[in-house]
Image (tube, rainbow, N blue to C red):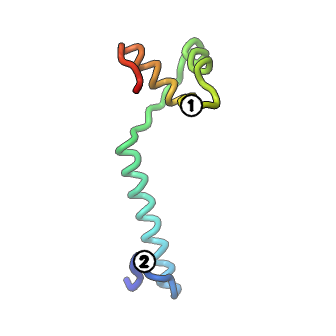
Amino acid sequence: MTWKPGLRVMTASDRTEWQEWSKARKLESQRERRRLHPRIDYYPSKAAQALIEARAGCFVGGDYSSVIDALLLAGAGEFPE
């Protein structure tokens, strides 16, 4: 391997090595992101969906994730920061 991160891509083999490195880096970044931010698939009932949509909007904290967090914390007797 002749190409290393930080060097210019000059030859066809450099480009191939850069592409392999780039792909590996993206995959590692995605694994780290998923480790830090686990995804939870959630399909609310019609009543829960109506409650979420009533509190959602185009303002800070109005996205579905923030609304669901606030509802969960309120239901547990805690309040969002």
* Residue found at x 44% / y 32%: 40
Q: Amino acid at mark 2?
A: Gly
* Residue found at x 37% / y 83%: 1
Measured in 3D between alpha carbons, the distance from the residue under mark 2 to the one under mark 1, in whole angstroms, is 38 Å
Q: Amino acid at mark 1?
A: Asp
| Mark seen at residue 63 | 1
Above or below, 34 relative to 68 = below
Q: Is residue 1 left or right of residue 12?
A: left
Q: Quadrant of residue 26?
A: bottom left
* Residue found at x 41% / y 24%: 80
**In the rendered structure, which disc, 2 or 1, sits on the residue that comes first in sequence?**
2
Q: Nearer the viewer, residue 78 or 4?
A: 78
Q: Position of residue 25 (x, y in %)?
A: 41, 63
Q: Is residue 4 left or right of residue 58?
A: left
Q: Nearer the viewer, residue 52 or 12?
A: 52
Q: Which residue is the site of mark 2?
A: 6
